[in-house]
Image (cartoon, rainbow, N blue to C red):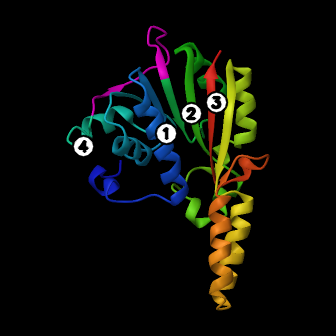
């Protein structure tokens, strides 16, 4: 497990910073029970930076949540507990699932629905198809063989009792295209063009259209039926 102090001093890529900022605001918006499914200590630290409330953690894909909790006592704002999706007595109002690269997404999604309160919110941070091609979008060297395409993952959620409310991509195809033109204009010395192109790139940075799932990173918001 990576050293927690070193993780606190590092800053992830811009796409991940924005995604975790939004997730942090949702976590802080309610006083209800909160559950986080994480595949890395990197993600756990990013949540700790933003949320001062109690969090129940579950490790996926080899992440030792219990070990992280014991090692992070000096860094927590709020209490950390080891969560469980096998005990249906636990009911959660907010559930965060970061990078669902597990081999059993259907089973976990169905179990999450069972431990969710009525109208509970599920927020999934998921890498898209362009994640591996955009250096600024890579936060972990995850196993690409387990990578779930966000568009397909929404079908898994629907089939296990979740209702998709919204989807959003960060630095999607339009933003990537305008960013390429911005870099080209800068290399040509046309700073007047570059300034305008940078503005257009930023205005299209959040992709909520049909191509959202192509973005290097996406957020899926769903609610329990």
> Label 4 belongs to which residue?
75
Q: Which residues are magenta?
A: 78-93
Q: Residue at x 48, y 20 (%)?
A: 93
Spatial distance from mark 4 to mark 2, Cα to Cα? 24 Å
Q: Is residue 192 left or right of residue 60?
A: right
Q: What residue is pinned by disc 3?
A: 105
Query: Are the two marked residues, 1 and 2, in contact with CB atoms closer than 8 angstroms?
Result: yes
Q: Dot 4 lies on which element?
A: loop
- Nearer to me, 65 or 52: 52
Please name the residue that numbered disc 1 is placed on. Answer: 23
In the rendered image, the residue lying farthest to the bottom is 189
Q: Disc 3 or 2, which lies upstream in sequence?
A: 3
Question: Which of labels 3 and 2 is toward the front?
Answer: 2
Nearer to me, 50 or 129: 50
Whether residue 58 is visible here, answered yes or no, is no
Coordinates of residue 21 in the picture (x, y in percent): 46, 46
Give the distance between the C-alpha atoms of the residues marked 3 and 1, in whole angstroms. Answer: 20 Å
Mark with earlier residue (4, 1): 1
């Amino acid at each position: 497990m990576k050293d927690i102090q070193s993780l606190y001093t590092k800053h992830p890529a811009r796409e991940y910073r924005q995604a975790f900022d939004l997730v942090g605001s949702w976590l802080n918006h309610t006083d209800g029970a909160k559950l986080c499914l994480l595949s890395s200590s990197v993600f756990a630290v990013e949540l700790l930076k933003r949320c001062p409330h109690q969090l129940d953690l579950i490790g996926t894909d080899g992440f030792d949540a219990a070990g992280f909790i014991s090692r992070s006592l000096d860094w927590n704002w709020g209490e950390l507990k080891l969560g469980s999706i096998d005990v249906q007595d636990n009911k959660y109002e907010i559930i965060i699932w970061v990078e669902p690269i597990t081999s059993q997404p259907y089973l976990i999604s169905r179990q999450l629905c069972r431990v969710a309160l009525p109208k509970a919110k599920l927020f999934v941070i998921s890498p898209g198809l362009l994640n591996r091609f955009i250096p600024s979008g890579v936060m972990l060297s995850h196993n690409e063989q387990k990578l779930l395409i966000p568009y397909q993952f929404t079908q898994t959620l629907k089939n296990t009792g979740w209702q998709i409310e919204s989807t959003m991509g960060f630095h999607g195809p339009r933003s990537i295209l305008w960013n390429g033109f911005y870099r080209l204009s800068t290399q040509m010395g046309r700073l007047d063009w570059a300034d305008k192109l940078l503005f257009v790139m930023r205005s299209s940075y959040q992709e909520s259209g049909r191509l959202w799932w192509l973005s290097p990173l996406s957020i899926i918001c769903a609610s329990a039926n």
